[in-house]
Image: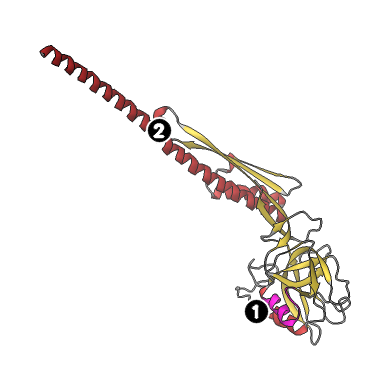
Amino acid sequence: MGDNMHILSEKLKDKNGSVIVFFALCITVLTGVCVLVIDYGILVHKRISLSNAVDAAALAGAQELIFDISNAELVAKSYLEANGVVPSDAEVVVYDSDTKIRVTAKIDVNYYFARVLGLDKGKVEATATAMCGPVIGVYEGIRPFAIEKQPLEFGEQYVLKEGGGEGSNGNYGALALSGRGGSTYVNNIINGYNGHLRVGDYVETEPGNMSGPTLQGINTLISRCDHIPQCTFDNYNSKCPRIITVIMVDSLDVNGRNNVRIAGFARFFLEGVAGLGNQSIVTGRFLKTVMSGELGDIEEDFGLKGVKLIR
C-alpha cells in the first residue's frame, strides 16, 4: 500500500506541474491578446482622428477653390496642421478643372504594449475628396425676387426689383412663392420661403409694383443688421439678414401673372430700397459665397456654390 501511495503522489505532482505550465501559457496568450487589443484601440482612435482631419482639410480646400484656387492647397494643409497632422506627411491634389481636391495623409502610430511582442509601430492612412459646385437646389430662406440670368459683375450695383415704368408687362421682379398677394409677399421677404426649389422648377410672378410691401420688407431686413460696425458689401457677417438668396430665371418677359423657369440661385447684399409712390427700387450687389444646398452641374455661374465630401 505504501508503494501505491507513493505512485499516486508522484502522479498528482505531475498533474499539478502540467496545470501550472498550462496556466502560465494561458496567461501569456491572454496578455498578448490584451496588449494587441489595447494598441489596436489606439490605432483605431488615431485612424478616426486622421480621417476627421483630412475631411475638414478637403472641405476647407474645396471652399477655397471658389475664391482663390492658388490658395486651396495651403488652406487644406493649414487645417491638417490645426488638427495635429504634419503637413509634410500629407499630399494635396487639385484636379478635374479645379473643382475637386483630394487630401491624403499618413502617420506612424507608436505601440506601447505590443513592443513585448516585437511590434514597435503601425501606420495609419486616410483620404478625403471634396468638390465645389453650383447650388442647384435650395431648401429654405429664398426671397421672392427674380432677376433674369446674365453674366454677373460681382461688386457692381444692381437693381433687384424695378420701379414703376420699368419691368416687363406688369412684372417688376417680384414672385408669388407659396401664395399670392401682398401679405404673403412681404412675409416671404422678411422670413424667406422655406419650400424646396431647384433649377428647372417654375415659379409664378407677382405682377404689380408691390410698393408698400417691398418697402416694409426690405427696410425690416436692413434694420435687423445689428453688427457693429454695420455690414457693408466689403465687410459683412455671413449670417447678416441683409444677405438674401434670390432666384435667377431664364426670362421675365412674360405677360402679367405667369410662370418663369428657374435657371439658378444667387446671393445678394441688400443696400437699400428707394423711390416714392409706385417706385420701391431695390438695390444691392451680388456676392460670391458658399451655402448649403443641392449641388449640380450647370453652365451659368451665379456665384453661389457649395462644397461636399464625395469620398
Q: Quadrant of the N terminus?
A: top left
Residue 255, position as x, y percentages in the image: 89, 75
Residue 263, position as x, y percentages in the image: 80, 62
* Magenta stretch, main secondary structure class: helix
Q: Identify residue for label 1.
A: 223
Residue 5, position as x, y percentages in the image: 14, 16
Residue shown at the point (46%, 37%) measured from the top left: 40
Amino acid on which the number 2 mark rests in the picture: Val
Q: Magenta stretch containing residue 180, yes or no?
A: yes
Segment colored magenta? 177-190
Residue shown at the point (31%, 24%) measured from the top left: 22
Q: Identify residue for label 2.
A: 33
| Kind of element beneath mark 2 | helix
Residue shown at the point (24%, 21%) measured from the top left: 15
Q: Magenta stretch containing residue 55, yes or no?
A: no
Residue shown at the point (68%, 72%) measured from the top left: 192
Distance from label 2 to label 1 (Cα)? 66 Å
